Image (spheres, rainbow, N blue to C red):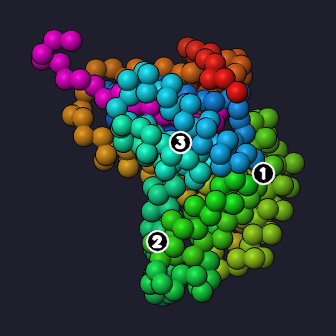
């Protein structure tokens, strides 16, 4: 590289599968001159039904692979890995690590504060959150909900959250059933149950990489249930947080993307393009062990 060229930032993005490509999609226009390495640990997906120890082990081995690609920053695009392995990753890696929970919660809190203000409800002090009615509904995997990471993150911002595990939604999205009567029926059941438990919510935070693809279906279902909610997904908020943390000067080099998957390249390309919003030409198969 000549001395007149600035070193471009190299960013690692990791998810259990292709869902995290929505975060990469949000990053591309924000940090355009960067080199991206995206890893989808598709062989070990779903993370959302596994234990903390297993998720941390998978996340650490995925991060180790990305470190070998000489990344300057790791974006953990997976909600489940962010909820259960972010501390392990931050401790183990010598580079900045950013997850999706804090940025997503901050965006949801801002939306909620606006709605509550519009309704004339004062913002609650953080000490009172536990006894206050929930204003944020978080839909996520079973492991994420069990970790209560979103509840803690909302509490730190003075807001109460109600978390609902929706284990059937990931396989339905993986099947490509993002606009299917079966998915609508499943979403209706989950949302009805959640709204019965937390009728005061005003914001819906999509706490799983796959759920942004269900946004139109969720909006429709909420309208049918007569309970419209402000829907937030963490992809854009996470990309903005990453751009703020990355101190590298803007590069005028063209963006470079490298994709890695631990299972079927064909499936990664087929499903991943829905998440990225563009074709995935080159995907490299890698083996991270069991
Ligand atoms: N990426 C996961 C998440 O955002 C969903 C898929 C999985 O369970 O691995 O929680």
Tell me where the magenta segment starts and ends, as one range: 1-19
Image quarter in which the N terminus is found = top left
Q: What is the crowding at mark 2: few (fewer than 14 residues within 10 Å), some, or many (at least 20)?
A: some
Examine the structure image and report whether residue 12 is included in the region drawn in magenta: yes
Disc 1 residue lies near ligand 1 with CB under 8 A? no
- Residue placed at 67% from the left, 66% from the top? 163
- Residue placed at 74% from the left, 59% from the top? 165
Q: What residue is pinned by disc 2?
A: 156
Disc 2 residue lies near ligand 1 with CB under 8 A? no
Left or right: 262 with respect to 98? right
Left or right: 2 with respect to 135? left
Image coordinates for residue 195, horizontal then vertical, percent: 74, 73
Question: Residue 12 appears in which quarter of the rendering?
Answer: top left
Q: What residue is pinned by disc 1?
A: 167
Q: What is the crowding at mark 1: few (fewer than 14 residues within 10 Å), some, or many (at least 20)?
A: some
3 over 27 or under it: above or below: above
Image coordinates for residue 17, horizontal then vertical, percent: 64, 33
Image quarter in which the C terminus is found = top right
Q: Does the rendering let one see residue 166?
A: yes
104 over 269 or under it: above or below: below
Q: What residue is pinned by disc 3?
A: 77
For the residues labelled 2 and 3, say whether their Cβ atoms are less than 8 Å apart.
Answer: no
Name the N-terminal-most of marks 2 and 3.
Answer: 3
Disc 3 residue lies near ligand 1 with CB under 8 A? yes
Name the N-terminal-most of marks 3 and 1.
Answer: 3
Image coordinates for residue 40, horizontal then vertical, percent: 60, 29
Q: Secondary structure at mark 1?
A: loop
- Residue placed at 69% from the left, 53% from the top? 143
For the residues labelled 2 and 1, say whether their Cβ atoms are less than 8 Å apart.
Answer: no
């Amino acid at each position: 590289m000549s001395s007149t060229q600035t070193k471009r930032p190299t960013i690692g993005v990791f998810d259990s599968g292709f869902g995290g490509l929505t975060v990469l999609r949000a990053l591309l226009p924000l940090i355009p001159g960067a080199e991206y390495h995206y890893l989808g640990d598709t062989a070990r997906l779903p993370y959302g039904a596994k234990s903390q120890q297993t998720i941390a082990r998978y996340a650490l081995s995925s991060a180790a692979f990305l470190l070998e690609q000489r990344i300057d920053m790791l974006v953990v695009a997976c909600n489940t890995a962010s909820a259960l392995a972010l501390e392990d990753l931050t401790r183990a890696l010598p580079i900045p690590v950013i997850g999706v929970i804090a940025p997503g919660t901050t965006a949801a809190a801002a939306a909620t504060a606006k709605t509550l203000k519009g309704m004339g409800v004062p913002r609650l002090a953080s000490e009172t959150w536990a006894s206050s009615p929930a204003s944020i509904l978080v839909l996520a995997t079973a492991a994420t909900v069990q970790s209560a990471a979103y509840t803690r993150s909302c509490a730190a911002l003075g807001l109460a959250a109600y978390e609902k595990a929706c284990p059937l939604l990931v396989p339905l999205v993986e099947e490509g059933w993002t606009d299917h009567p079966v998915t609508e029926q499943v979403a209706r059941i989950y949302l009805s149950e959640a709204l019965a438990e937390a009728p005061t919510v005003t914001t819906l935070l999509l706490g799983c990489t796959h759920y942004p693809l269900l946004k139109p279906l969720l909006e429709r279902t909420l309208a049918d249930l007569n309970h419209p909610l402000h829907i937030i997904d963490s992809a854009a908020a996470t990309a903005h947080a990453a751009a703020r943390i990355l101190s590298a000067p803007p590069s005028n080099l063209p963006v470079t993307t490298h994709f890695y998957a631990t299972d079927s390249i064909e499936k990664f390309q087929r499903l991943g393009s829905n998440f990225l919003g563009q074709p995935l030409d080159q995907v490299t198969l890698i083996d991270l062990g069991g």
